[in-house]
Amino acid sequence: MTPIYLFMKLIADLHLHSKYSRATSRDMDLEHIAFSAQRKGIDIIGTGDFTHPEWFAELKTKLEPAEEGFYTLSNNAKVRFVITGEISNIYNRQGKTRRVHNVVILPSLETAEKINNVLSWQGNLKADGRPILGMDSEELLKIVINTEPQAMFIPAHIWTPWFAVFGSMSGFNSLEEAFGENTKYLAALETGLSSDPKMNWRVSALDKFTLVSNSDAHSPDNIGREANVLDIDFNYSSFREAIVKKDKNKFLYTIEFFPEEGKYHYDGHRLCQVRMSPEARKKVNGMCPVCGKPLTIGVLSRVDELADREEGYLPPNAIPYKSLVPLKEIIADALKCQAKTKAVEEEYQKLINHFPNEFNILLDASFEDLKKFVSENIAQSIILVREGKVHLEPGYDGEYGKVKVILPETPNPSQKELF
């Protein structure tokens, strides 16, 4: 076992899925997850899907105890695993069908086994890595906390329309409406890809909760597209305390998508290729101007609906964030091609071979150092993304948005520019 790390900057991605979840890459096994996490620069990675019997059997067989609450693979001593899983709760409350996804983080495989035994009576855990249970989210919260008081229960991607606690199509208007007096046991809230902390700061009821960001990865390439940066003692207790207590000295910042790139940022109707800002949607009374059916109300509109503050408000206890674009997407934009091409992979490998990891490249590497290994165009694009100089075409109704770097020689004033 490698030595215990004491008080250092660590990057954690806590929400992802295994090969046993639907619409997930077959490469989402422990070996590929660990390899991708190390290449990205992630120190603590969630296992995902601890409720699935076959995946759990692999976790028990392959993971070895490391520091308190963390595990490692024998062939990868650097990356630490923490036991995590997402559960889909679909149930009726107050005459409405609720679809709420929740992330559970646990301090041990032994605790996970106890929770699995209880949940196995609530539904078929083998059907999907993210099981669908017909039980109330509040009841799930009670089971988790009663079984393991040191567990962390986090409502997932809280604004997503169809499967979230505040979702426009199936959610609630407050946490208390969803979780009652047990709201106090929530460890944190996950912002999701289509919102960032700045949007969440408009809702004062969320101030007391830590806002975490995770990749929700279904393939190795997507690991780390959102993450959390912590300065902690390397063990579960310190890790949990930094999140639950919202300690700004230990929870340094989150790494975010530009929320416009998320699949549900704007309102819209994908089948008719209709995308609308909240203002435009209001003018058509929420109905698709092409087919006349209701539009899917996106995250920006939903935040605006529940907000009690103006845009730009900064709570005094807010944890900072940095918005980034995955490195392969930046390279693809610079080369004017798709991210999953040989040309992009070649340029990506040039950088990965000469820098510690992808986050080091995106967050810290200088322009002078970058252009030693790749073209000036790619190096400049990385710096411009770091500075927030990007064009954004918002995603809507399940369609990812698009991000394009603003190069000085090719300005496009017709699109939105973020700084």
Image (tube, grey):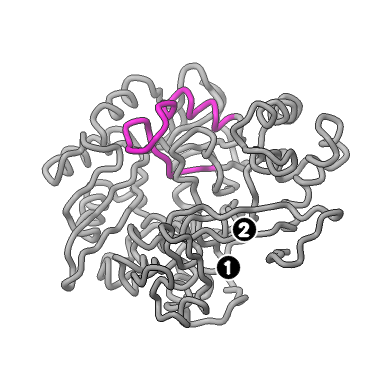
* Disc 2 + disc 1, Cβ < 8 Å: yes
Compared across the picture, whether 31 is left or right of 172 comes to right
| Image height of 366 relative to 256, above or below | above
Any part of residue 100 in sight: yes
> Mark 2 vs mark 1: which is more N-terminal?
1
Where is residue 120? Give x, y as percent: 15, 40
Q: Residue at x 82, y 45 (%)?
A: 380
Where is residue 30? Give x, y as percent: 43, 26
Question: In terms of secondary structure, where does tag 1 sit?
Answer: helix
Magenta highlight on residue 29: yes
Q: Residue at x 76, y 26 (%)?
A: 354
| Image height of 255 relative to 394, above or below | above
Q: Residue furthest top?
A: 75
Where is residue 168? Give x, y as percent: 36, 69
Query: Given the image, on which type of amino acid does mark 2 rest?
Result: Tyr
Q: Residues within 10 Å of mark 1 (few under 14, many from 20)?
A: some
Where is residue 418? Give x, y as percent: 70, 64
Q: Residues within 10 Å of mark 2 (few under 14, many from 20)?
A: some
Q: How many marks?
A: 2
Stretch in magenta? 12-38
| In-front residue for pair 407/349 | 407
| In-front residue for pair 129/175 | 129
Circle 2 residue: 321
Question: In terms of secondary structure, where does tag 2 sit?
Answer: strand
Query: Given the image, on which type of amino acid does mark 1 rest?
Result: Lys
In which quadrant of the rendered view does residue 409 lie? bottom right
Q: Quadrant of the C terminus?
A: bottom right
Q: CA distance from mark 2 to mark 1?
A: 9 Å
Q: Residue at x 37, y 38 (%)?
A: 23
Circle 1 residue: 198
Any part of residue 238 in sight: no
| Image height of 77 relative to 368, above or below | above
